[in-house]
Amino acid sequence: MKLHVTDREGGEHELEGTKGWRVMEIIRDAGLPIAAECGGACACATCHVYVDPAWTDKVEPRGEEENDMLDLAFDVQENSRLSCQILFDESLDGLKVTLAPE
Amino acid sequence: MPDGQSQNPIRTDVTIVGAGPCGLFAVFELGLLDIKCHLVDILDRPGGQCAELYPEKPIYDIPAVPICTGQELTDKLMEQIAPFDPVFHFGQMATALSKTEDGWWRLTTDMDTVIESKVIVIAAGGGSFMPKKPPIKDIDAFEDTSVFYAVRQMEKFRGKHLVIAGGGDSALDWTVNLQPLAASLTLVHRRDDFRAAPDTVNKMRQLVASGGMKLEIAQISGLEGSDGQLTGVVLKDKDKGEWSIPCDMLLPFYGLTMKLGPVAEFGLNLHENLIPVDTEKFQSSTDGIFAIGDINNYPGKLKLILSGFHEAALMSQAAHRIVHPDRKLRFQYTTSSTDLQQKLGVS
Protein backbone atom coordinates (compact mmCIF):
# COMPACT_ATOMS: atom_id res chain seq x y z
CA MET A 1 0.00 0.00 0.00
CA LYS A 2 1.28 3.43 -0.93
CA LEU A 3 1.01 6.89 0.54
CA HIS A 4 2.08 9.78 -1.70
CA VAL A 5 3.37 12.86 0.09
CA THR A 6 4.31 16.19 -1.44
CA ASP A 7 6.66 18.17 0.78
CA ARG A 8 6.76 21.95 1.23
CA GLU A 9 9.31 22.35 -1.55
CA GLY A 10 7.14 20.42 -3.99
CA GLY A 11 9.19 17.22 -3.76
CA GLU A 12 7.19 14.01 -4.12
CA HIS A 13 7.66 10.95 -1.94
CA GLU A 14 6.13 7.51 -2.31
CA LEU A 15 5.89 5.90 1.12
CA GLU A 16 4.97 2.38 2.12
CA GLY A 17 1.72 2.59 4.07
CA THR A 18 0.91 0.30 6.97
CA LYS A 19 -2.63 -0.64 7.90
CA GLY A 20 -3.65 0.76 11.27
CA TRP A 21 -0.99 3.46 11.33
CA ARG A 22 -1.96 7.08 11.38
CA VAL A 23 -0.97 8.96 8.25
CA MET A 24 1.11 11.27 10.48
CA GLU A 25 3.07 8.26 11.76
CA ILE A 26 3.82 7.02 8.26
CA ILE A 27 5.09 10.48 7.27
CA ARG A 28 7.15 10.85 10.46
CA ASP A 29 8.58 7.35 10.17
CA ALA A 30 9.83 8.20 6.69
CA GLY A 31 11.77 11.12 8.13
CA LEU A 32 9.78 13.80 6.31
CA PRO A 33 9.52 17.14 8.15
CA ILE A 34 6.30 16.94 10.13
CA ALA A 35 6.47 18.32 13.66
CA ALA A 36 3.53 16.42 15.20
CA GLU A 37 4.43 18.03 18.50
CA CYS A 38 1.71 16.46 20.62
CA GLY A 39 2.52 12.99 19.29
CA GLY A 40 -0.90 12.32 17.81
CA ALA A 41 -3.21 13.42 20.63
CA CYS A 42 -5.13 15.92 18.46
CA ALA A 43 -3.79 18.58 20.80
CA CYS A 44 -1.77 20.79 18.46
CA ALA A 45 -1.98 21.43 14.73
CA THR A 46 1.54 20.64 13.64
CA CYS A 47 0.69 17.63 11.44
CA HIS A 48 -1.53 19.66 9.11
CA VAL A 49 -1.82 18.28 5.56
CA TYR A 50 -3.99 18.87 2.50
CA VAL A 51 -5.73 15.78 1.17
CA ASP A 52 -5.70 15.57 -2.64
CA PRO A 53 -9.21 16.54 -3.87
CA ALA A 54 -9.55 13.14 -5.55
CA TRP A 55 -9.31 11.51 -2.11
CA THR A 56 -11.35 13.80 0.16
CA ASP A 57 -14.49 11.65 -0.22
CA LYS A 58 -12.64 8.46 0.70
CA VAL A 59 -11.20 9.79 3.95
CA GLU A 60 -13.36 9.86 7.07
CA PRO A 61 -14.56 13.43 7.72
CA ARG A 62 -12.94 15.69 10.32
CA GLY A 63 -14.00 15.24 13.90
CA GLU A 64 -15.19 18.20 15.95
CA GLU A 65 -12.03 18.25 18.07
CA GLU A 66 -9.88 18.11 14.95
CA ASN A 67 -11.79 21.03 13.44
CA ASP A 68 -11.25 23.00 16.66
CA MET A 69 -7.52 22.27 16.56
CA LEU A 70 -7.30 23.45 12.94
CA ASP A 71 -7.91 26.94 14.40
CA LEU A 72 -4.21 26.77 15.37
CA ALA A 73 -3.13 25.98 11.81
CA PHE A 74 -2.46 28.37 8.95
CA ASP A 75 -3.92 28.48 5.48
CA VAL A 76 -6.69 26.07 6.36
CA GLN A 77 -8.54 24.78 3.29
CA GLU A 78 -11.60 22.60 2.83
CA ASN A 79 -9.27 19.65 2.31
CA SER A 80 -7.19 20.43 5.42
CA ARG A 81 -6.71 17.57 7.85
CA LEU A 82 -4.61 16.78 10.87
CA SER A 83 -2.79 13.71 9.62
CA CYS A 84 -2.74 12.15 13.10
CA GLN A 85 -6.49 11.76 12.76
CA ILE A 86 -6.44 9.71 9.54
CA LEU A 87 -6.03 5.97 10.03
CA PHE A 88 -4.42 4.28 7.05
CA ASP A 89 -5.85 1.08 5.57
CA GLU A 90 -6.48 -0.65 2.22
CA SER A 91 -9.19 1.83 1.27
CA LEU A 92 -6.58 4.58 1.31
CA ASP A 93 -3.98 2.74 -0.79
CA GLY A 94 -2.61 5.45 -3.10
CA LEU A 95 -3.73 8.37 -0.90
CA LYS A 96 -2.10 11.68 -1.80
CA VAL A 97 -1.44 14.42 0.74
CA THR A 98 0.60 17.64 0.77
CA LEU A 99 2.37 19.00 3.85
CA ALA A 100 0.88 22.38 4.87
CA PRO A 101 3.12 25.41 5.47
CA GLU A 102 4.44 25.96 8.98
CA MET B 1 19.08 44.51 45.82
CA PRO B 2 16.74 41.53 45.38
CA ASP B 3 18.16 38.05 45.12
CA GLY B 4 18.79 36.74 41.66
CA GLN B 5 20.06 39.91 39.97
CA SER B 6 23.44 39.90 38.29
CA GLN B 7 25.25 41.52 41.24
CA ASN B 8 23.57 39.23 43.73
CA PRO B 9 22.87 35.89 42.07
CA ILE B 10 20.89 33.09 43.65
CA ARG B 11 23.12 30.21 44.69
CA THR B 12 21.70 26.73 44.84
CA ASP B 13 22.73 23.12 44.22
CA VAL B 14 20.96 22.40 40.95
CA THR B 15 19.23 24.51 38.32
CA ILE B 16 16.67 22.64 36.27
CA VAL B 17 15.69 24.10 32.91
CA GLY B 18 12.10 23.01 32.33
CA ALA B 19 9.31 22.27 34.82
CA GLY B 20 7.59 19.49 32.90
CA PRO B 21 7.06 16.05 34.45
CA CYS B 22 10.75 15.05 34.20
CA GLY B 23 12.03 18.31 35.67
CA LEU B 24 9.52 18.02 38.49
CA PHE B 25 10.40 14.41 39.29
CA ALA B 26 14.09 15.31 39.25
CA VAL B 27 13.34 17.57 42.23
CA PHE B 28 12.13 14.48 44.09
CA GLU B 29 15.08 12.25 43.26
CA LEU B 30 17.57 15.03 43.99
CA GLY B 31 15.71 16.00 47.15
CA LEU B 32 16.09 12.51 48.59
CA LEU B 33 19.84 13.06 48.24
CA ASP B 34 19.73 16.44 50.07
CA ILE B 35 20.08 18.44 46.88
CA LYS B 36 18.13 21.69 46.50
CA CYS B 37 16.70 22.87 43.20
CA HIS B 38 15.59 25.96 41.34
CA LEU B 39 13.55 25.51 38.17
CA VAL B 40 13.14 27.86 35.20
CA ASP B 41 10.26 27.51 32.75
CA ILE B 42 8.94 29.73 29.98
CA LEU B 43 5.35 28.79 30.79
CA ASP B 44 3.56 30.48 33.67
CA ARG B 45 2.84 27.21 35.47
CA PRO B 46 4.35 23.73 35.97
CA GLY B 47 3.67 20.72 33.77
CA GLY B 48 5.31 21.53 30.44
CA GLN B 49 3.58 19.76 27.55
CA CYS B 50 1.24 18.02 30.01
CA ALA B 51 -0.09 21.42 31.06
CA GLU B 52 0.12 23.24 27.75
CA LEU B 53 -0.83 20.64 25.17
CA TYR B 54 -2.99 18.05 26.87
CA PRO B 55 -4.10 19.03 30.39
CA GLU B 56 -7.47 17.32 29.86
CA LYS B 57 -6.25 14.35 27.81
CA PRO B 58 -5.81 10.94 29.41
CA ILE B 59 -2.41 9.29 29.94
CA TYR B 60 -2.51 5.51 30.37
CA ASP B 61 1.16 4.53 30.60
CA ILE B 62 2.35 5.87 33.93
CA PRO B 63 3.32 2.80 35.97
CA ALA B 64 0.65 1.91 38.55
CA VAL B 65 -1.54 4.83 37.47
CA PRO B 66 -4.06 3.26 35.07
CA ILE B 67 -5.35 6.65 33.96
CA CYS B 68 -4.69 10.29 34.72
CA THR B 69 -4.84 13.53 32.75
CA GLY B 70 -1.85 15.71 31.99
CA GLN B 71 -3.00 18.17 34.63
CA GLU B 72 -3.59 15.45 37.23
CA LEU B 73 -0.09 14.07 36.66
CA THR B 74 1.33 17.56 37.10
CA ASP B 75 -0.69 18.17 40.28
CA LYS B 76 0.41 14.83 41.77
CA LEU B 77 4.07 15.54 40.98
CA MET B 78 3.79 18.97 42.60
CA GLU B 79 2.34 17.31 45.69
CA GLN B 80 5.09 14.69 45.68
CA ILE B 81 7.94 17.23 45.50
CA ALA B 82 6.45 19.79 47.92
CA PRO B 83 8.56 18.51 50.88
CA PHE B 84 11.70 19.59 49.04
CA ASP B 85 10.63 23.25 48.61
CA PRO B 86 11.67 23.72 44.99
CA VAL B 87 11.86 27.34 43.85
CA PHE B 88 10.17 28.09 40.51
CA HIS B 89 10.99 30.89 38.09
CA PHE B 90 8.01 30.83 35.74
CA GLY B 91 7.43 32.86 32.61
CA GLN B 92 11.17 33.05 31.99
CA MET B 93 13.38 31.62 29.30
CA ALA B 94 16.88 30.40 30.13
CA THR B 95 18.98 32.44 27.73
CA ALA B 96 22.64 32.07 28.64
CA LEU B 97 24.94 29.70 30.49
CA SER B 98 28.50 30.38 31.53
CA LYS B 99 30.96 29.28 34.20
CA THR B 100 32.07 31.53 37.04
CA GLU B 101 35.70 31.90 38.04
CA ASP B 102 35.07 29.74 41.11
CA GLY B 103 33.52 26.93 39.05
CA TRP B 104 29.77 27.46 39.39
CA TRP B 105 27.36 27.33 36.47
CA ARG B 106 25.75 30.72 35.95
CA LEU B 107 22.37 30.64 34.22
CA THR B 108 20.68 33.86 33.11
CA THR B 109 17.06 34.24 32.02
CA ASP B 110 15.37 36.74 29.72
CA MET B 111 13.97 38.41 32.87
CA ASP B 112 17.58 38.89 34.08
CA THR B 113 17.27 36.34 36.86
CA VAL B 114 20.72 34.92 37.58
CA ILE B 115 21.09 31.53 39.24
CA GLU B 116 24.44 29.95 40.08
CA SER B 117 24.58 26.25 40.81
CA LYS B 118 26.94 23.31 40.85
CA VAL B 119 24.87 21.28 38.42
CA ILE B 120 22.59 22.09 35.46
CA VAL B 121 19.81 19.73 34.45
CA ILE B 122 18.22 20.40 31.09
CA ALA B 123 14.73 18.94 31.11
CA ALA B 124 13.39 21.19 28.38
CA GLY B 125 11.34 18.63 26.43
CA GLY B 126 10.77 19.81 22.87
CA GLY B 127 12.28 23.19 23.76
CA SER B 128 10.66 26.46 24.71
CA PHE B 129 7.01 27.06 23.99
CA MET B 130 6.89 30.10 21.74
CA PRO B 131 4.05 31.74 19.80
CA LYS B 132 3.32 30.24 16.39
CA LYS B 133 4.23 32.65 13.63
CA PRO B 134 1.94 32.75 10.62
CA PRO B 135 3.87 31.69 7.49
CA ILE B 136 3.17 35.03 5.81
CA LYS B 137 5.80 36.54 3.55
CA ASP B 138 7.81 39.35 5.17
CA ILE B 139 6.08 39.07 8.55
CA ASP B 140 9.50 39.23 10.24
CA ALA B 141 9.94 42.79 9.02
CA PHE B 142 6.89 43.92 11.01
CA GLU B 143 7.52 42.03 14.26
CA ASP B 144 7.82 44.16 17.42
CA THR B 145 6.79 47.30 15.52
CA SER B 146 3.40 46.32 14.07
CA VAL B 147 3.04 42.59 14.68
CA PHE B 148 2.87 41.32 18.28
CA TYR B 149 2.42 37.77 19.55
CA ALA B 150 1.76 38.83 23.13
CA VAL B 151 0.43 41.86 24.98
CA ARG B 152 2.86 43.10 27.62
CA GLN B 153 1.53 46.65 27.99
CA MET B 154 -2.00 47.41 26.87
CA GLU B 155 -1.16 51.12 26.53
CA LYS B 156 0.91 50.38 23.44
CA PHE B 157 -2.35 49.60 21.64
CA ARG B 158 -4.33 52.68 22.70
CA GLY B 159 -5.73 54.67 19.78
CA LYS B 160 -4.51 52.12 17.23
CA HIS B 161 -6.40 50.30 14.52
CA LEU B 162 -6.01 46.69 15.55
CA VAL B 163 -6.50 43.34 13.87
CA ILE B 164 -6.54 40.30 16.13
CA ALA B 165 -6.38 36.83 14.56
CA GLY B 166 -7.43 33.55 16.13
CA GLY B 167 -10.36 31.83 17.82
CA GLY B 168 -9.11 30.65 21.20
CA ASP B 169 -9.00 32.24 24.63
CA SER B 170 -5.99 34.48 23.96
CA ALA B 171 -7.57 35.97 20.84
CA LEU B 172 -10.96 36.49 22.45
CA ASP B 173 -9.66 37.75 25.82
CA TRP B 174 -7.48 40.37 24.16
CA THR B 175 -10.27 41.31 21.78
CA VAL B 176 -12.55 42.10 24.69
CA ASN B 177 -9.80 43.78 26.75
CA LEU B 178 -8.27 45.91 24.00
CA GLN B 179 -11.52 46.96 22.30
CA PRO B 180 -12.16 49.89 24.69
CA LEU B 181 -8.65 51.30 24.05
CA ALA B 182 -8.39 50.74 20.33
CA ALA B 183 -9.38 53.24 17.64
CA SER B 184 -10.86 50.26 15.85
CA LEU B 185 -10.65 46.52 16.23
CA THR B 186 -11.31 43.67 13.82
CA LEU B 187 -11.21 40.03 14.87
CA VAL B 188 -10.28 37.64 12.05
CA HIS B 189 -11.05 33.95 12.40
CA ARG B 190 -11.35 31.17 9.86
CA ARG B 191 -14.87 30.11 10.92
CA ASP B 192 -17.82 31.53 12.81
CA ASP B 193 -17.20 29.19 15.71
CA PHE B 194 -14.86 29.81 18.63
CA ARG B 195 -13.05 27.52 21.07
CA ALA B 196 -12.75 30.31 23.64
CA ALA B 197 -14.79 30.51 26.84
CA PRO B 198 -18.48 30.99 25.87
CA ASP B 199 -18.80 34.03 28.12
CA THR B 200 -16.01 35.86 26.30
CA VAL B 201 -17.39 34.82 22.93
CA ASN B 202 -20.77 36.33 23.94
CA LYS B 203 -19.10 39.59 24.95
CA MET B 204 -17.34 39.73 21.59
CA ARG B 205 -20.62 39.09 19.76
CA GLN B 206 -22.31 41.90 21.70
CA LEU B 207 -19.49 44.27 20.74
CA VAL B 208 -19.95 43.30 17.10
CA ALA B 209 -23.73 43.78 17.33
CA SER B 210 -23.34 47.23 18.91
CA GLY B 211 -20.84 48.33 16.28
CA GLY B 212 -17.92 48.47 18.71
CA MET B 213 -15.81 46.13 16.58
CA LYS B 214 -15.85 43.98 13.46
CA LEU B 215 -15.64 40.26 12.95
CA GLU B 216 -14.28 38.90 9.68
CA ILE B 217 -14.61 35.21 8.87
CA ALA B 218 -11.48 34.80 6.77
CA GLN B 219 -7.79 33.98 6.93
CA ILE B 220 -4.88 36.37 6.70
CA SER B 221 -2.95 35.92 3.49
CA GLY B 222 -0.71 38.96 3.34
CA LEU B 223 0.52 42.16 4.96
CA GLU B 224 0.66 45.70 3.59
CA GLY B 225 3.03 48.44 4.68
CA SER B 226 6.70 49.32 4.70
CA ASP B 227 9.62 50.00 7.05
CA GLY B 228 8.05 47.87 9.75
CA GLN B 229 4.85 49.89 9.77
CA LEU B 230 1.74 47.95 8.85
CA THR B 231 -0.97 49.77 6.90
CA GLY B 232 -3.29 46.83 6.30
CA VAL B 233 -3.74 43.09 6.19
CA VAL B 234 -4.96 41.05 3.24
CA LEU B 235 -7.75 38.62 4.01
CA LYS B 236 -8.99 35.74 1.94
CA ASP B 237 -11.96 33.46 1.85
CA LYS B 238 -12.76 30.72 -0.64
CA ASP B 239 -16.09 32.33 -1.62
CA LYS B 240 -15.36 36.02 -1.18
CA GLY B 241 -11.85 36.02 -2.63
CA GLU B 242 -9.19 38.44 -1.37
CA TRP B 243 -9.64 41.90 0.10
CA SER B 244 -7.66 44.09 2.43
CA ILE B 245 -8.56 45.99 5.59
CA PRO B 246 -6.55 48.91 6.98
CA CYS B 247 -4.82 48.55 10.35
CA ASP B 248 -1.77 49.71 12.35
CA MET B 249 -1.12 46.58 14.34
CA LEU B 250 -1.72 42.85 14.04
CA LEU B 251 -1.90 40.42 16.95
CA PRO B 252 -1.85 36.78 15.77
CA PHE B 253 -2.88 34.21 18.41
CA TYR B 254 -2.41 30.74 16.95
CA GLY B 255 -1.18 28.96 20.04
CA LEU B 256 2.33 27.90 20.93
CA THR B 257 4.93 25.74 19.29
CA MET B 258 8.17 24.28 20.62
CA LYS B 259 11.54 25.67 19.55
CA LEU B 260 14.88 24.60 21.00
CA GLY B 261 15.77 28.25 21.56
CA PRO B 262 18.86 29.45 23.45
CA VAL B 263 19.72 25.95 24.76
CA ALA B 264 21.31 25.53 21.33
CA GLU B 265 23.81 28.24 22.33
CA PHE B 266 24.86 26.62 25.60
CA GLY B 267 27.91 25.07 23.96
CA LEU B 268 26.69 21.47 24.20
CA ASN B 269 27.04 18.88 21.48
CA LEU B 270 23.70 18.54 19.74
CA HIS B 271 22.36 15.92 17.39
CA GLU B 272 19.25 16.93 15.43
CA ASN B 273 18.29 19.41 18.15
CA LEU B 274 18.65 16.77 20.87
CA ILE B 275 21.35 16.50 23.52
CA PRO B 276 23.31 13.24 23.33
CA VAL B 277 23.91 11.74 26.78
CA ASP B 278 25.41 8.62 28.27
CA THR B 279 23.03 6.12 29.84
CA GLU B 280 24.81 5.83 33.17
CA LYS B 281 24.56 9.45 34.29
CA PHE B 282 22.57 11.12 31.51
CA GLN B 283 25.31 13.70 31.27
CA SER B 284 25.86 15.83 28.18
CA SER B 285 29.20 16.44 26.47
CA THR B 286 29.99 18.87 29.29
CA ASP B 287 30.70 17.71 32.85
CA GLY B 288 28.05 18.90 35.27
CA ILE B 289 25.39 19.49 32.62
CA PHE B 290 22.82 16.73 32.44
CA ALA B 291 19.87 16.26 30.09
CA ILE B 292 16.77 14.20 30.87
CA GLY B 293 13.41 13.61 29.21
CA ASP B 294 12.41 14.31 25.62
CA ILE B 295 15.37 16.61 24.96
CA ASN B 296 18.06 13.97 25.33
CA ASN B 297 19.09 11.20 23.00
CA TYR B 298 20.89 7.88 23.38
CA PRO B 299 20.69 4.49 21.66
CA GLY B 300 17.24 3.06 22.30
CA LYS B 301 15.76 6.32 23.58
CA LEU B 302 11.97 6.37 23.93
CA LYS B 303 10.22 9.68 24.43
CA LEU B 304 8.06 8.49 27.29
CA ILE B 305 7.43 10.18 30.62
CA LEU B 306 8.43 6.98 32.42
CA SER B 307 11.82 6.98 30.65
CA GLY B 308 12.37 10.53 31.85
CA PHE B 309 11.62 9.48 35.43
CA HIS B 310 14.25 6.73 35.22
CA GLU B 311 16.73 9.19 33.75
CA ALA B 312 16.04 11.62 36.60
CA ALA B 313 16.87 8.94 39.19
CA LEU B 314 20.20 7.98 37.62
CA MET B 315 21.16 11.58 36.91
CA SER B 316 20.61 12.35 40.59
CA GLN B 317 23.19 9.76 41.66
CA ALA B 318 25.78 11.48 39.46
CA ALA B 319 24.71 14.95 40.60
CA HIS B 320 25.23 13.88 44.20
CA ARG B 321 28.91 13.23 43.53
CA ILE B 322 29.27 16.80 42.27
CA VAL B 323 27.11 18.59 44.85
CA HIS B 324 28.26 16.60 47.88
CA PRO B 325 31.71 15.25 46.88
CA ASP B 326 32.61 14.66 50.53
CA ARG B 327 29.58 12.48 51.28
CA LYS B 328 29.30 8.78 50.67
CA LEU B 329 26.17 7.93 48.73
CA ARG B 330 23.96 5.54 50.66
CA PHE B 331 21.37 3.70 48.60
CA GLN B 332 18.08 3.61 50.46
CA TYR B 333 14.40 2.81 49.92
CA THR B 334 11.65 5.22 50.93
CA THR B 335 9.71 2.25 52.30
CA SER B 336 12.28 1.37 54.93
CA SER B 337 14.50 4.41 55.47
CA THR B 338 13.60 6.62 58.42
CA ASP B 339 16.07 9.13 57.08
CA LEU B 340 14.26 9.43 53.74
CA GLN B 341 10.88 9.44 55.45
CA GLN B 342 11.96 12.40 57.57
CA LYS B 343 12.94 14.28 54.42
CA LEU B 344 9.51 13.54 53.04
CA GLY B 345 7.90 14.72 56.26
CA VAL B 346 6.10 11.42 56.87
CA SER B 347 8.12 10.12 59.79
Image: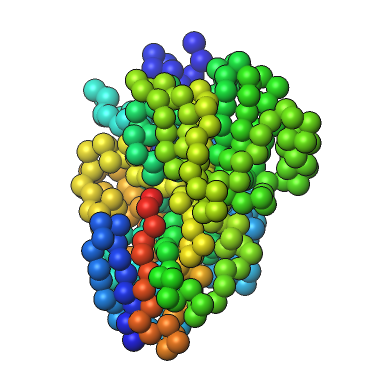
User: Does residue B139 sit above or below A98 in this rendering?
Assistant: above
- B306 and B221: which is toward the camera: B221
Q: Is residue A95 above or below residue B138?
A: below
Q: Residue at x 68, y 30 (%)?
A: B213
B334 or B161: nearer the viewer: B161
Q: Residue at x 26, y 76 (%)?
A: A14
Furthest residue in direction bottom, as rendered: A90
Q: How many marks?
A: 0
Quarter of the image where one finds residue B7: top left
The answer to whether one can see residue B73 in this image is no
Does A97 sit left or right of A64 as displayed? left
Image location of residue B347, percent across then percent down: 66, 51
Residue B232, image x, y percentages: 48, 29
Furthest residue toward top? B1
Residue B179 in the figure: left or right of residue B203? left
* B10 up-or-down from B186: above or below: above
Q: Position of residue B279 (x, y in %)?
A: 29, 61
Q: Where is residue B251? Give x, y as percent.
A: 52, 32
Residue A6 seen anywhere in this rendered image of the structure: yes
Q: Residue at x 64, y 64 (%)?
A: A64
Residue at (40, 25) in percent of width and height: B225
Colouring scheme, one of rainbow, by chain, secondary structure, one colour? rainbow
